Image (cartoon, rainbow, N blue to C red):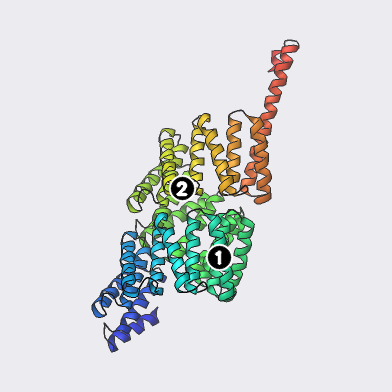
Amino acid sequence: MPLLEAILAQQEQVLGDNHPDTLVSRNNLACAYLEAGDLTRAIPLHEATVAQCEQALGDSHRQTLAGRVHLAGAYQEAGDLERAIPLYEATVAQYEQVFGDNHPDTLASRIHLACAYLEAGDLTRAIPLHEATLARCEQALGDSHRQTLAGRVHLAGAYQEAGDLERAIPLYEATLTQREQVLGDNHPDTLNGRHNLACAYLDAGDLARAVNLMEATLARYEQVLGDTHPQTLVSRSHLAGAYQKAGDLAQAINLMEATLTQREQVLGDNHPNTLASRNNLASAYLEAGDLEQAIPLYEATLARYEQVLGDNHPNTLASRDHLATAFQRAGDLKRAIPLHETVLAQCEQVLGDNHPNTLASRNNLASAYEEAGDLEQAIPLYEANLAQCEQVLGDNHPHTLASRNNLAYAYLQAGDLTRAIPLYETVLAQSEQVLGDTHPQTLASRNNLAGAYQEAGDLEQAIPLFEAALAQREQVLGDNHPDTLLSRRNLAGAYQAAQAVQQRSTATSTTATGPQQPSTAE
């Protein structure tokens, strides 16, 4: 950074303020500020540079258009999609007009726009644009061009975001094979491809493949890029998250703590990735039941997000929501519910009514109402949220299935078994079809349906389903995973309930046929 600042100062002095080389240096410095997470310096410098490019080089000069793309990216990084997306759209239109539809810069700008649509939760525009751009890249640049491979990865990521892992994973796998062949086994793009594939395996519930691939990829990152390279730290952070999903909280927390220390040292205390590490560590503490460490860390992280990114940045809103959930987990509903309500109002205002983060926030508020025993507010909110998930994400998206499951549980809590059980049965059937028989979410759904059968007194259906869920969790998650332990407790409870029914039945039979001994029978 100091070197870039010194180069810019020299060029301003020697070449002048509006010389093309000076403008390039200014753009490079702004990009460096952005990479360092310093939005307060990056955005004004990008804005000034674009204005100077327009004045000195003209509105349609290649350097001006590139500057506009960088400025849109800075707005996107700041969570300001209302400014980012129109700027991307205008720049794409100019690229098409000036350089043509198939120029590499035009194709790259289209990818940036599609990624912004994806971040805005607009899958209906993001996926077709990614698909069309990839087709153009294949036609114009060739099947194995680096930009074509990048386009393929972005499309796979969009499919993954849409919950369509049946298309995402094969595309990731094919692209990784091509990168290994074209770029080599240790090229940074190849390593990123491996990392993305591992994350998709994790989403698919294939924990064994995800963890193994993440471990191998992290070892390569350490070897090729070094122990503290930002991308190595990203890989380490995701591996810790995979350990957490696999129920290995001790290993997850150790790795998260180490990664946070490294990020503080390498990136600085207020870098967005450092803040993300803090949030992840707080989440692991929360899952481990360590509220004394989780809540203060969430509070401190939220204060940093507000200071660094601003009150309405999507990451700030997510951090606020996490803190509300931690209050809820601690039983402090007086603080949890108002904070959930605030976050939902902000999400609706900043992100829009149908953004995936808004849907998640609405679900979390409904959950808090439910926990407070306020089913009159919880159930209509769950119902409205499910309808929006179906409309925005589709009927079979994993988040839609989760929303349906949560509504079924609320019906169960309200004693409305006639609506709870059929809804649970639907969720299980859809989970088996969409996610697969042994996905952790499918196993949770199976466990929940068994619980509903037990609540209805139907132990003949509940016990075999509990047994199946336990056997699968032991096989998929391992013997000591928290979900496996929960299944074991649930099955033991069902056995106990069946034994109590049998004892009551035996006692009733004895009372009816033998001597009148009410006290013995009781």
Count residues near mark 1 (Cα–Cα under 10 Å), then give few for <14, some for 14-19, many for 20+: many
| CB-based contact (under 8 Å), mark 2 and mark 1 | no
Count residues near mark 2 (Cα–Cα under 10 Å), then give few for <14, some for 14-19, many for 20+: some
Q: Nearer the viewer, residue 518 or 246?
A: 246
Q: Using the image, determine if residue 517 lies above or below residue 290.
A: above
Q: Using the image, determine if residue 126 lies above or below residue 290.
A: below
- For label 1, the SS is helix
Q: Nearer the viewer, residue 209 or 366?
A: 209
Q: Find the residue positioned furthest to the top.
A: 516
Q: Find the residue positioned furthest to the bottom.
A: 14
Horizontal side of 227 relative to 337 (left or right) equals: right
Quarter location, residue 270: bottom left
Q: Using the image, determine if residue 375 lies above or below residue 16.
A: above
Q: Is residue 42 visible?
A: no
Give coordinates of residue 491: x percent, y percent: 66, 37
Horizontal side of 332 relative to 505 (left or right) equals: left
Q: CA distance from mark 2 to mark 1?
A: 27 Å
Residue beneath label 2, please? 394
Give coordinates of residue 465: x percent, y percent: 65, 38
Quarter location, residue 310: bottom left
Give coordinates of residue 327: x percent, y percent: 46, 46
Q: Is residue 467 visible?
A: yes
- For label 2, the SS is loop
Look at the image and tell me in which quarter the C terminus lies.
top right
Q: Using the image, determine if residue 93 lies above or below residue 404.
A: below
Residue beneath label 1, please? 195
User: What residue is shown at x 47% (from left), y 72% (from top)?
Assistant: 147
Q: Which mark, by number, is residue 337?
A: none
Circle 1: residue type: His
Circle 2: residue type: Gly
